[in-house]
């Protein structure tokens, strides 16, 4: 299969359907990275948090649909990415479904989906990125989790602590 080089990143030339899906996939993925971070950094339950969270979730749906299309076209090369994407969408939907009843599950589900989104990106693109190309391949699999899971644990612990006004 031929390869197209875009800004130093090799892109498989798997036909127009693949390339169209990839263009939409990249756009939705960038949207997810930005909106997921903004949702995590805004006040929980407030309008900005809900808005960024919804955009993240819908962006992730688009990422998953386009991933599915690309995986059908290039299954052998993309099967591991399809598994990561499936886990990301399942954990996001679990988190979203628990946003009211079980906030800790919401935090863990949405946070895990974000970690998986980044893991898929780095596993696929890490070898072609400046600085990341110097890391061993295992780092692409582990670094997002090594950073993300402690942050999620902190968020859950903060959620469980009684507020200052409740203690007085």
Image (spheres, helix red, strand yellow):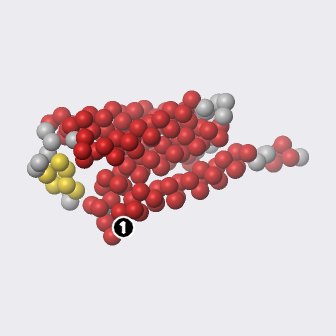
* 64 sits to left or right of 90: left
**Residue at (56, 36) in percent of width and height:** 95
**Residue at (53, 45) in percent of width and height:** 111
**Residue at (56, 53) in percent of width and height:** 149
Q: Quadrant of residue 14?
A: top left
Q: Looking at the picture, how far across and down is residue 77, in whole percent?
A: 25, 47
Residue lying farthest to the front in this orientation? 76
Is 2 located above or below residue 134 in the figure? above
Q: Looking at the picture, how far across and down is residue 87, in whole percent?
A: 45, 40
Q: Looking at the picture, how far across and down is residue 114, in whole percent?
A: 47, 46
Is 32 located above or below residue 65 in the figure? below
Residue lying farthest to the right in this orientation? 168
Is 150 located above or below residue 26 in the figure? below
**Element assignment for label 1:** loop
On the image, numbered disc 1 is attached to which residue? 136
Q: Quadrant of residue 134?
A: bottom left
Tally of numbered tags: 1
| The one of 137 and 96 positioned closer to us in this rendering | 137
* 161 sits to left or right of 38: right
**Residue at (22, 56) in percent of width and height:** 9
Q: Looking at the picture, how far across and down is residue 60, in whole percent?
A: 41, 37
* 168 sits to left or right of 149: right
Q: Does residue 32 appear in the picture of this structure?
A: yes
Q: Does residue 55 appear in the picture of this structure?
A: no
Q: Quadrant of residue 50?
A: top right
Residue lying farthest to the bottom in this orientation? 134
Neighbours of disc 1 within 10 Å: few (<14), some (14-19), many (20+)? few
């Amino acid at each position: 299969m031929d390869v197209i080089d875009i800004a130093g990143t090799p892109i498989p030339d798997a036909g127009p359907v693949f390339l169209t899906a990839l263009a939409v996939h990249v756009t939705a993925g960038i949207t997810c990275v930005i909106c997921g971070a903004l949702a995590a950094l805004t006040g929980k339950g407030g309008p900005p948090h809900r808005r960024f969270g919804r955009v993240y979730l819908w962006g992730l749906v688009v990422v998953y649909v386009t991933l599915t299309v690309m995986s059908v076209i290039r299954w052998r090369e993309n099967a591991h990415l399809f598994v990561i994407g499936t886990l990301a969408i399942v954990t996001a939907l679990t988190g979203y479904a628990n946003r009211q009843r079980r906030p800790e599950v919401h935090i863990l589900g949405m946070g895990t989906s974000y970690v998986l989104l980044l893991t898929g990106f780095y596993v696929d693109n890490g070898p072609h990125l400046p600085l990341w190309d110097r890391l061993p391949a295992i780092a692409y699999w582990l670094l997002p989790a090594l950073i993300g899971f402690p942050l999620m644990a902190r968020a859950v612990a903060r959620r469980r602590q009684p507020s200052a006004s409740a203690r007085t």
